[in-house]
Image: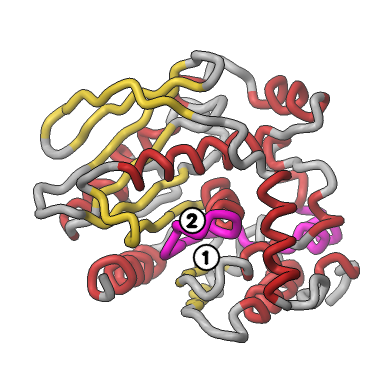
């Protein structure tokens, strides 16, 4: 493939269990796992199974979340919805109940009808936290040797901590769904947190060096810049660490964030990760771009039903 450097090679870390464990540990540090604890403050029901959640960061800053919980016997399967970016800073966690233009429909009510609970938190700089500008927050983190994406992953691990601790949750049936920004954060999160049983990532898998070669890397916001990441692993290799847990990858071939050369390298590395077992499903559409299509949504719901309900 043109423009692909050695760092994207799926064999970079040798594929042994010890090497994979070491890589997960390195990535956990880069993704700031354990560095962004959230403290639960309370839940206020809206009705219809929807609840407003509140948390605080270690610094005492408020973090808003939304829970959609079906009226069904517990323990329940739960999906952590990592919301998209789309330059819509005001949306944040509301994606779960209100949706967004790039999605077929809000995910929360659909999952509730299936008997699956779901949770979504405002990422830093989004939703009720949108007063903090992304560029300023990202630069401040980078100057400290951290990243805004690392804060997002660290807080998402804390969200999983809270989910897994609830007495109405089956901690063995936790899934993650994300589109665009949420997709990348989703496979980064699942790579370093083994509690994720099933991952659905929509419209964002691409090898970063391939994306740079294709001139598409600046379509991503500065939030995604994790210093030194490409010296450690490519995105396909990271997504391959999810194996043998189930993973669905949805890609639109006309998506400028997933050019063909960058996708092919990433997929080769993911498949190498699954060579020793696990369920990997790749759904590609030749005529779609950076949107969730009806076929992608159908594939995602069937996948989550299989992994979190039928096999539960």
Q: Residue at x 75, y 41 (%)?
A: 225
Dot 1: element? loop
Asked if marks 2 and 1 touch (Cβ < 8 Å), the reply is yes
Could you say which disc has been placed on residue 288 in the image? 1
On screen, residue 145 above or below 257? above
> Residue 194, position in %: x, y?
50, 59
Q: Residue at x 27, y 56 (%)?
A: 170
Name, please, the residue furthest toward the bottom.
276
Q: Quadrant of the N terminus?
A: bottom right
What residue does disc 2 label? Answer: 291
Could you say which disc has been placed on residue 159 in the image? none
Magenta segment boundaries in residue numbering: 190-216
Side of 257 where 58 appears, left or right: left
**Nearer to us in this view, 183 or 78:** 78
Side of 119 where 194 appears, left or right: right
> Residue 227, position in %: x, y?
82, 42
The local crowd at label 2, few if under 14, some if 14 to 19, many if 20 or more residues have their Cα within 10 Å, is many
User: Disc 2 versus disc 1: distance between alpha carbons?
Assistant: 7 Å
Q: Residue at x 77, y 25 (%)?
A: 139
Q: Is residue 203 magenta?
A: yes
């Amino acid at each position: 493939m043109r423009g692909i450097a050695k760092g994207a090679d799926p064999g970079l870390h040798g594929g042994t269990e010890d090497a994979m464990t070491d890589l997960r540990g390195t990535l956990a540090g880069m993704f700031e796992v354990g560095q962004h604890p959230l403290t639960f403050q309370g839940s206020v029901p809206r009705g219809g199974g929807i609840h407003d959640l509140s948390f605080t960061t270690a610094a005492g800053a408020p973090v808003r979340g939304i829970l959609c919980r079906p009226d069904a016997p517990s323990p329940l399967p739960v999906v952590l919805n990592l919301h998209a970016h789309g330059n819509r800073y005001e949306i944040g966690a509301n994606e779960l109940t209100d949706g967004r233009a790039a999605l077929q429909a809000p995910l929360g009510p659909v999952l509730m009808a299936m008997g699956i609970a779901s949770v979504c938190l405002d990422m830093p700089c989004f939703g009720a936290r949108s007063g903090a500008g992304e560029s300023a927050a990202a630069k401040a983190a980078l100057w400290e040797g951290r990243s805004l994406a690392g804060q997002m992953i660290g807080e998402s691990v804390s969200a999983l901590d809270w989910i897994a601790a609830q007495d109405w949750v089956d901690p063995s049936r936790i899934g993650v769904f994300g589109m665009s920004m949420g997709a990348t954060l989703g496979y980064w999160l699942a790579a370093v947190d083994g509690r994720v049983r099933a991952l659905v990532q929509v419209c964002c898998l691409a090898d970063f060096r391939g994306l740079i070669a294709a001139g598409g890397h600046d379509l991503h916001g500065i939030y995604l810049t994790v210093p030194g990441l490409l010296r450690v692993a490519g995105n396909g290799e990271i997504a391959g660490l999810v194996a043998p847990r189930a993973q669905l990858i949805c890609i639109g071939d006309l998506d400028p964030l997933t050019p063909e050369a960058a996708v092919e390298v990433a997929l080769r590395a993911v498949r190498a990760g699954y060579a020793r077992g696990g369920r990997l499903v790749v759904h590609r559409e030749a005529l779609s771009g950076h949107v969730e299509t009806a076929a992608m949504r159908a594939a995602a719901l069937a996948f989550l039903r299989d992994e979190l309900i039928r096999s539960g």
